[in-house]
Image (spheres, rainbow, N blue to C red):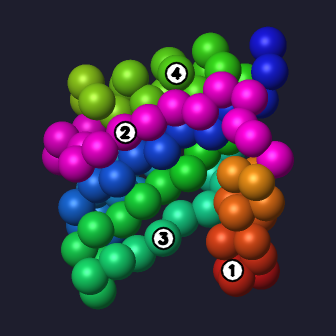
């Protein structure tokens, strides 16, 4: 299967950490980048992996996270501009 990105937006750094841990333990995915907005009250996690693993990981968060995500999304075979945007975001943390 092809590469995919999964997006989970959730309130709070603790809930985001829990969500990321849950996703990584559920499926073969890794953190691509993350963003904190509103002083950390809103956190967006971007994971990457194959389509089925990303789908499984995002669904796990929707069902089992300590807080319900504000939004989720999955991009299968993302356009090269999306890949560039995610890499640019990730490079700020290197």
Q: Is residue 85 left or right of residue 22?
A: right
- Numbered range of the magenta stretch: 65-80
The tag earlier along the polypeptide, 2 or 1, is 2
Q: Which residue is disc 2 drawn over?
A: 72
**Circles 1, 4 touching at the beta carbon (< 8 Å):** no
The tag earlier along the polypeptide, 2 or 4, is 4
Q: Which residue is disc 3 drawn over?
A: 35
| Residue 93, label in figure | 1
Mark 2, secondary structure of its residue: strand
| Residue 55, label in figure | 4
- Quarter-of-image position of residue 73: top left
Mark 4, secondary structure of its residue: helix
Q: Quadrant of the N terminus?
A: top right
Mark 1, secondary structure of its residue: loop
Which residue is rendered at x = 34% and y = 33% of the image? 61
The tag earlier along the polypeptide, 1 or 4, is 4
Mark 2 burial class by Cα count in 10 Å: few <14, some 14-19, many 20+: some
Residue mark closest to the camera, 2 vs 1: 2
Question: x, y (%) of residue 47?
Answer: 60, 45
Q: Can the viewer see residue 29?
A: no
Which residue is rendered at x = 44% and y = 30% of the image? 58
**Residue 78 within the magenta-colored segment of the rendering:** yes
Out of 93 and 72, give the one closest to the viewer.
72
- Residue that lies at the very extreme toward the bottom in this rendered image: 39
Mark 3, secondary structure of its residue: strand
Q: Is residue 29 above or below residue 38?
A: above
């Amino acid at each position: 299967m092809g590469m995919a990105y999964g997006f989970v937006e959730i309130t709070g750094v603790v809930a985001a950490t829990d969500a990321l841990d849950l996703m990584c333990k559920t499926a073969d995915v890794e953190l691509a980048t993350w963003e904190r907005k509103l002083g950390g009250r809103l956190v967006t996690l971007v994971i990457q992996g194959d389509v089925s693993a990303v789908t499984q990981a995002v669904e796990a968060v929707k069902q089992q996270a300590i807080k319900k995500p504000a939004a989720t999304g999955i991009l299968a075979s993302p356009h090269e501009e999306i890949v560039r945007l995610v890499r640019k975001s990730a490079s700020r943390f290197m």
